Amino acid sequence: PPPPGPLPIRRLQESVINRIAAGEIIHRPASALKELIENSLDAQSTSIRVTVKDGGMRLLQIQDNGCGIRKADLPILAERFTTSKLSSFSDLAHIATYGFRGEALASISYVAHLMVVTKTKADACAWKAIYTDGALTPTKGATSAEPKATAGTDGGKPVLQYSDTSVSASQLFRRAGSSGPEVSTPSGSTTEQAIRLLYGQTIAKDLLHTTVSSQSADTTSDDEEDADGVPQSGSWSAEAHFTNAHYQAKKMVLLLFINHRLVDSSRIKKALENVYTGILPKGASPFIYLSKVTKDMLSLQIDPQAVDVNVHPTKREVHFLDEDVIIERIADALQQKLVGQSQSRVFEYQT
Ligand code: ADP
Ligand code: MG
């Protein structure tokens, strides 16, 4: 029988709290990979190397040539809310790094074995540290949990290694099967080259390209400033790589980056779907890579929702100021290019 009154309220143990939080950030190996790559980029790496075994279930190893981690910071590296990227709340308004919550490595250490090998320019040797549940643990054969001096890190490169113990899903890394267990991103490649590399020649050969910005010739852009001369949405520009009418996939792929962050916008998706409705046969879908970059990272200030994305790690859907106008301009630009490129089909163009 149910108890006669309410059950007592108890405080959750910290380890339980941390484990629940870890599950919000690391859903599957791909989430860990995303976090680790973002860390490499935040550390100014120009070369990032990813090695994967069993779709990341057995091993996920990231090597980068970024700034590395100071030995003195290793003891708290995998604690929750430890970060080198944010110190006060007001920093959030103009944060230019992917991370700032200091939760990724902590989360990974709760769901996997985490090993870090790192060497900064100032270090004479590399340091190896192993983490479990947020804390340093002794490396094999050692009695203390201190980071251990180690010979090398593959030519001075820091190595972050993650191998799974308790992540339960096993999807993702679809591409790993086709291109071998290792993916490496060459530095300095263009967006076109990256799309060809990651998505293949079938898409790359049918790609169109266009750019559009708040400055583009447009008769309605006079009202960009309000009465006080304050810019309403700031200047913006967008670049799109998108497939032409020859490319017909079953499912639409939209990669949308705003201020370099991969996000979702159901309104942009809808608008671009509509553009292609008049161009592709029923049931066929395009591939679109769209990045909207505000000129000045400070304009994240007038884009509070975009910051919001990372304030909560699971939130990807964004809204931004003057969404309607900006989306319409982008959709128009794609439409014009698609119509202009087509020789084999006749389009009805409504004005
Ligand atoms: P966040 O990225 O939000 O700061 P993380 O848990 O992802 O939190 O990382 C914690 C800290 O560890 C970072 O702030 C950074 O100083 C350091 N770090 C993590 N990965 C790397 C890396 N690949 N290279 C250099 N430093 C790193
Ligand atoms: Mg991070």
Image (spheres, rainbow, N blue to C red):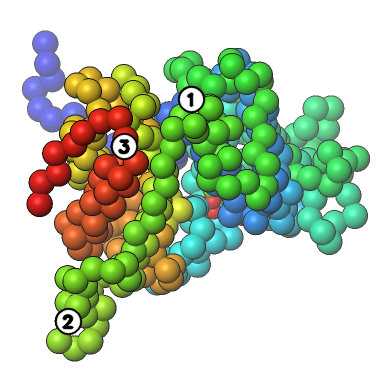
- Which quadrant is home to the N terminus? top left
Image location (x, y in percent) of residue 180: 66, 19
Q: Nearer the viewer, residue 96 or 107?
A: 96
Q: Which residue is mark 3?
A: 342
Q: Dots 3 and 2: beta carbons under 8 Å?
A: no
Residue receiving disc 2: 226
Give the amino acid at mark 2.
Asp
Type of the residue with mark 1: Thr
> Which residue is at 46% across, 17% downward?
171
Q: Would residue 326 appear left or right of 23 to someone viewing this image? A: left
- Local crowd size for mark 2, using a 10 Å CA cut-off: few (<14), some (14–19), many (≥20): few
- Can you give x and y, in whole percent of width and height, for residue 219 in the image? 19, 71
Marks 1 and 2, how far apart at CA: 46 Å
Q: Mark 1 — residue?
A: 202
Of callouts 3 and 2, which one flags the residue occurring earlier in the amino acid sequence?
2
Q: Where in the figure is residue 148, as x and y percent of width and height?
A: 83, 42
- Eye-nearest disc, 1 or 2: 1
Label 1 beta carbon less than 8 Å to ligand 1: no
